Image: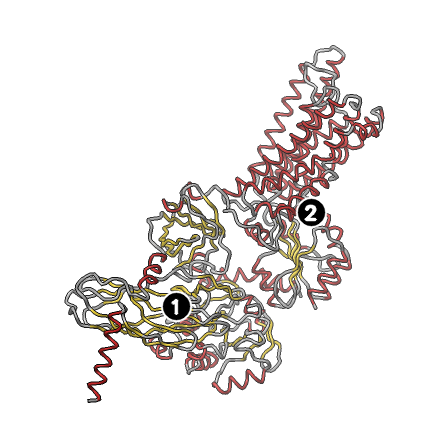
Amino acid sequence: MLIRKLLAALQGVVLAGLLAGQASAGPVNTGHLEAELVAQDAAAVPGSTIYVALRQKIQPGWHTYWRNPGDAGDATKIVWTLPTGWTAGDIVWPTPEKSRVGPLLDYAYTGEVLLPVPITVPADAKVGSTVTLKAAAAFLVCEQICVPEDAVVTLDLPIVAGAPGPDAKWGAVVAKTLADAPKSAGLKAVFKLDGKVLKLALTGGPLKSADMAGAYFYPYSGKVIDHAAEQTIERGPEGLTLGLTPGYDFTSGTPPTELAGVVALSGQAYEVTATAGDPPAGAAGLGAPAVAAKTGGTSLAAALLFAFVGGLILNLMPCVFPVLSMKAASLAGHAHDPGKTRLQGLAFLVGVVATFLALAGLLIAVRAGGAAVGWGFQLQSPVVVASLALVMLLVALNMSGVFEFGTSVQGVGSSVSARGGVTGAFFTGALAVVVAAPCTAPFMAGALGFALTQPPLISLAVFLALALGFAAPFVLLAFAPALLRRLPRPGAWMDTLKKGLAFPMYGTAAWLLWVFTQQAGSIALGELLAAAVLVGFAGWLWGHAQTLRSKGKPSLLSLILALLALAGAIALTALTASATPPTTVATASVDAAPAGERLASEPWSPERVAALQAEGRPILVDFTAAWCVTCQVNEKVAMSGAGVAKVFKDKNAVLLRADWTNRDATIAAALAEHGRAGVPLYLVYPAKGGAPVILPQLLTEGMVVEAIEKAAS
Amino acid sequence: MSVTRRLVAAGLPLIAVAAPTLVHAAPAPAFTAKDIDGKVRSLSDFRGKTVVLEWVNEGCPYVKKHYSGNMQGLQQAATADGVVWLTIASSAPGKQGYFPDGAAAKSWMSAKGAKPTTLLLDPEGVVATAYKAKTTPHMFVIDRGGAIVYEGAIDDIPSNKVADLSKAKNLVAAALADVKAGRKVAVAYSQPYGCAVKYKDA
């Protein structure tokens, strides 16, 4: 009697379930999540495949893991117990979330997640019967702590002949999970290890118009990339290229032949299996995707302002000031003719802006090509440095009166200022920018760092602000006759001043020679010095020819000789291009440094920083370059005193030097990490570990001492 | 002192080149930490010996799985062989697996019968950061020349089930056997599995 009642009740339950169009099961609470089996369809059809999902409703704050859990954790596992003839496939893993835990990154699920599994129903499944699918699920649920939990969940599934229709409660959810799951969309995927960057290039139809902000590669293997490292995104007309940090397999193990995983874009995810090869052209070249300006970072307005002020300050740099002050003095000669001075001012402005934007465009293009360069990159090429040194020498010789600029064979005796100088003003602007670019003034580093992490248009806007700031004083002068009239009248004193101001230019040339030696070694220096002598000779011959012409004497021979000497100088400079940088110089000089009062430094590397931090020592990292004036000044003023040496000794601190004189991708990456595009950058790592403190770009000895003391406490 | 260090540092790559077993090995970062007796220990104290580093968090289910006897057995066998076994607790204060003092760590060790050379207290996570320790357990084998010759999981079955122990190949035991025999370590890396190291900023 009782049994019959129970059976009737049971029938009622089953019937109710069927009427509701729902495969029946029940959730199991395992402690930190609720697990159950849910089906896409209300019933199974013989000979078909039905998706049954393990649903996890995870407690807020807790998470379970993707198939590759990332740095820690463990993926959910399901062991099925199915009726004879039924088989279960692999879990269709939804795209996970990135879960950052301190320095680690895990790939996880939070909230509610469905893990669908395709179940094949045998053709001989008996219509009208109900089968029970049983899954033993084991999962690791973590919050701050991890708890392994298990659940045995079942699902009763009726077998029907016709189309069953979706499960009333879960059908749509399972369908959506499957629709959103990463798809193999036939994307072409190629990977290539490029120095310390593992490039993953993806091209194909679905990527052409996709929003690539936030694109991310989730690898199936936990050994191929450094999970926690940022992935860089580079757009292309046909797809995108992700810059990954190679993991163990690429750095020390056997490089894999395949790189498989999921590429997630906003709203869509694709399964990819990349093979080794050269990235296709269409996968890069359009820069990083536009992202909303980072909160807490430099805002666009602030970056523009800093760039403008930085541009103003550049006017005072020793390599720029002589050129501009002479130009300004020459303007004074036209104070009576406002039209003419305005024209010159405008020409100068155009020259400055055009050159700045051209340099910025070049920089953006080079970076888009994947090269790790930053501002000042133009001085990382020894040939450019050599050329600039010779240009400086020519300018200096000109100011010394050895010869006149702009004096062609046709126009003997006329000087730049006398000629009206619109072209002259334009080229003065261009020259000023070229020589000023390495003197990245304080205020500018932040703005430029910001600029280079932004889409090209915003980058260009920042550079435009810099150009406007740089040109402002001269243009203001040109447009304000009242100001101009206050300048002393031109006269013989101007010639004296000009000859005096030639010496900062000689100094700049000498400095560039020194930079060049750091880059190219002493043999190349010999070649460049010979070129410099030839330039001097050419300048003198040219001046001689000018004198002869002004006296109405033939000057052709002198001119030809001058041109020959100049050609020789250019040939010698080109020769230095083949010079190899003396890589050992820096370290050798470090080792040779006496351990006395002078502050010794070690070459920087991220590993060295980690090792020293592990030893509990305070660290000052000096990101520098021979061509960076601010860096040299800081090293002399703030780091070579006895006070600094003492505090380093007392606090057992270490000075690490990252020398960016030549191109170096690791240093460029470290600069970018701190939002900078160029040197100087000073980081002080506390002895107790943790994130470094960034010091200002203009240092005093007191600041360094205080920073080290703070880092040691 | 610093000159000596430089000389040693300069000499290290030479050793690495001379010994064919160390082709891919990375130098083990130096570290200093207090042990359960308050004694300051440095990796350099053990130069010339094979060293095992084991990251631990007594509350982690994966650690508990291996402390069902597997880890203690390995520690005993290794230390009997002259290997220095350093168990490192890097859980930050307030986090799971944090030992407030050496006594707390000692009482856990004696309850479990753990037999490492010693246990190092690293609540600031300095040693863990230097080694980029990710999980508990996360194992390192450092050879006599100070190079990391094995890094990763303790065995090849990532699970928290004691039942899997008998089926798994213990990768640390295999690495130690290779080092002892003067062979190149066959499996020099595996993805570590377990709970995340409880760093202080996590």
Determine the secondary structure under disc 2.
loop
Within 10 Å of the Cα at label 1, are there few (<14), some (14-19), or many (20+) other Cα atoms?
many
Image height check: is B188 above or below A554? Answer: below
Q: Mark 2 lies on which chain?
A: A
Q: Quadrant of residue A496?
A: top right
- For this view, does A387 lie left or right of residue B115? right
According to the image, label 1 marks what residue? Answer: A75
Q: What kind of residue is marked 2?
A: Phe
Image position, residue A272 (x, y; %): 36, 53
Q: Can residue A88 be seen in this view?
A: yes
Within 10 Å of the Cα at label 2, are there few (<14), some (14-19), or many (20+) other Cα atoms?
many
Determine the secondary structure under disc 1.
loop
Image position, residue B179 (x, y; %): 44, 70
Q: Nearer the viewer, residue A275 or A578?
A: A275
Q: Nearer the viewer, residue A289 or A412?
A: A289
Q: Is residue B189 visible?
A: no
Q: In which quarter of the image is residue B32?
A: bottom right
According to the image, label 2 marks what residue? Answer: A443
Can you tell which mark lies on residue A491? none
Q: How far apart are marks 1 and 2 (CA)?
A: 48 Å
Of callouts 1 and 2, the N-terminal one: 1
CB within 8 Å, label 1 to label 2: no
Q: What kind of residue is marked 1?
A: Ala
